[in-house]
Amino acid sequence: MLQMKTRIATLTSVGLLALAFSFAVSVFWASPYILTLVALPFPFFLSLLFRNKKRVLRLALVGMIVGPIVEIACVFGGLWTYSDTGELPAIPLWILPGWTCFPLSLVVIAETVTKRPFRTPRSILTPYWLIGAILLQTVLFVSLGNQTITALVAAAVLTFGVALFMLRKETLVLLIVGGILGPLVESLPILAGAWSYRTSEILGMPVYMPWAYGLFAVFVVTLAAYVADASRSSKPDTNDLKVR
């Protein structure tokens, strides 16, 4: 019973942090550098749930690098536009700590729900095909993102590939939680005017966006977990999360 309460408390903590970040963006988006300072503690709070701080750093770095690169491509591709970037091209600075939280929070959720360390394909080719999948998804949605039906078909094709090559508990958790949490975190800032999608169909975003978020979570978080655990033994540390 105590372990169940601990897991619920952990998931609740991550959810509250996501809600707090969404609220902070909706309040401070017009002052992007102040928002950056407000956003900086969020990755630190998430890191407190891990024992292995080197793993935290690697997870965070993958999110902080991959997320903004994809965002820049999508902004230049015309999928969405930020209202105030603080004179920076395409994206504001607070995006960096925001995307740093992405793999940290989802790894915590996946490991808490599955009750085991995050498992990734251990092939030497794994990071290359995951990067390829991220690039493919980015190209598809930048090219087709303003055509809802075509984008939904692209999402279905990518999901079929995930089911063939990445079917495991972690994948299902990321697909579902990423598809729910991502759009929910976005919805309040969109309503506040922080950014806007060219196609607005549900919660201020395209109808396929939850699906796209779920797929992106699968690819990015799996890549982050692979990088984070690459230098460790083949059997991950079963005590990494403090909630176990």
Image (cartoon, helix red, strand yellow):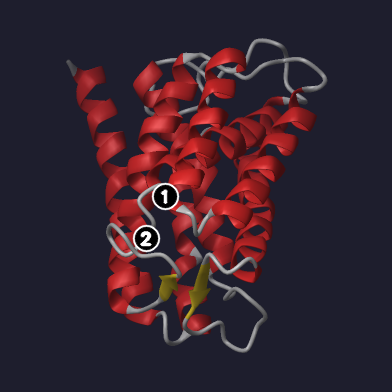
Left or right: 57 as drawn, with respect to 113: right
Residue located farthest toward the right when viewing the structure as drawn: 124
- Amino acid type, residue under disc 2 in the picture: Met
Q: Residue 209 carries which label?
A: 1
In-front residue for pair 231/203? 203
Classed neighbour count for the residue bearing mark 2: other residues with Cα under 10 Å, few (<14), some (14–19), many (≥20) = many
Where residue 92 appears, x then y in whole percent?
A: 57, 76
Residue drawn at (60%, 35%) of the image: 219
Q: In the picture, which quadrant includes the N terminus?
A: top left
Classed neighbour count for the residue bearing mark 1: other residues with Cα under 10 Å, few (<14), some (14–19), many (≥20) = many
In-front residue for pair 215/235? 215
Residue drawn at (63%, 75%) of the image: 90
Where residue 55 appears, x then y in whole percent?
A: 64, 35
Asked if labels 1 and 2 touch by Cβ distance under 8 angstroms, the answer is yes
In-front residue for pair 169/200? 200
Q: Is residue 61 visible?
A: no
Residue drawn at (58%, 69%) of the image: 78
- Amino acid type, residue under disc 1 in the picture: Met
Q: What element carries label 2?
A: loop
Where residue 88 appears, x then y in whole percent?
A: 65, 83
Residue drawn at (34%, 46%) of the image: 181
Q: Measure how far apart labels 2 and 1 are at the Cα level.
A: 7 Å
Q: Is mark 1 on a helix, strand or loop?
A: helix
> How many numbered marks, from 0 up?
2
Which residue, given by chain and number where applicable, does mark 2 sit on? 205
Residue located farthest toward the left when viewing the structure as drawn: 1
Residue 124's place in the image compared with 192, above or below, is above
